[in-house]
Image (cartoon, rainbow, N blue to C red):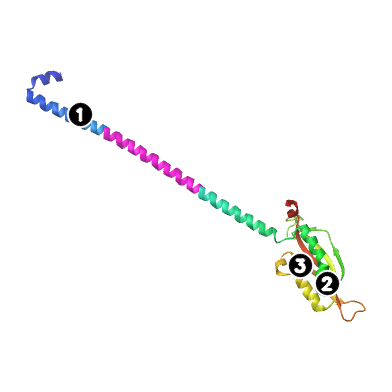
Amino acid sequence: MIIEKLEKLDKSQRIKIAVMAVIATGWLSYYVITRSSAIKLNQAEAKYTDIQNEFADMETQLIGLSKLEERFAYLQNQFDRQKQKWFTRTQALQFFENINAMALAHNLRPISRIISEPEILFDNKKEEAEPQNHSLRTQSARVIVTGNYFDIVDFVGDLTLPDRARKVSIRDMHIALAPGDDFYPRAAFNVVLLVDLSQEDEA
């Protein structure tokens, strides 16, 4: 039917229709190509956005991991510093062994030194008598010396130097003149140490 209509047209009209058909075909092809490219471009942009989001997530996770590693290193450092506040069992025994020598260095005469066994620390605030740290102990030595009062004071100060303030304490101290001695008092007291047995286990 379309062919019959075209046959009825003269040559010039046929040329015009042919040109219009070519132009229409060109525009249609251009539209199809352009639309296909736009779709592909949109798809590429969407994929690029997804990649950017994935990269941002990975970056966030890496930052979180880095902060976690820093936190772990900080806690490990705090733990190591905390452990240094206490004596090991070997250090405690060595400290007790040196007490007589320290007394002699202060012009005092050691009378006795009785070392006790380590005792578990308890928290009296809790109803149940459960130790708060199974490895932390107190160990004490009952020390008796005689000598000049000021030398005794210096001796006690030497036992509790600032770097030992957290792990050495003096308790139950009594100073009085020894029977039959009108010049040199006798001092009796307990030297109490904080001992962490776990450090010996790790060694």
**Res. 8 mark:** none
Residue nearer the viewer, 23 or 149? 149
Q: What separation in Å lies between label 3 and label 1 (alpha carbons)?
A: 102 Å
> Three-letter amino acid code at disc 1?
Thr
Which residue is painted at 43% across and 44% down in the image? 53
State the CA–CA distance, disc 2 to disc 1: 116 Å
Q: Check disc 3 and give the amino acid type.
A: Ser
The kind of secondary structure element at disc 2 is helix
Asked if residue 195 is positioned above or below residue 30 in the image, the reply reads: below
- Total numbered circles: 3
- Crowding at dot 1, Cα within 10 Å, few <14 / some 14-19 / many 20+, comes out as few
Q: Which residues are magenta?
A: 33-61
Q: Position of residue 79 (x, y in %)?
A: 66, 56
Spatial distance from mark 2 to mark 3, Cα to Cα? Answer: 20 Å
Of the numbered discs 2 and 3, the one sitting upstream in the chain is 2
Tag 2 residue: 104
User: Can residue 120 be seen?
Assistant: no
Image quarter (top left, top right, bottom left or bottom right) of the N terminus: top left
**Residue at numbered disc 1:** 25
When the figure is inspected, residue 135 is found, relative to residue 106, above or below; the finding is above
In the image, 48: left or right of 6?
A: right
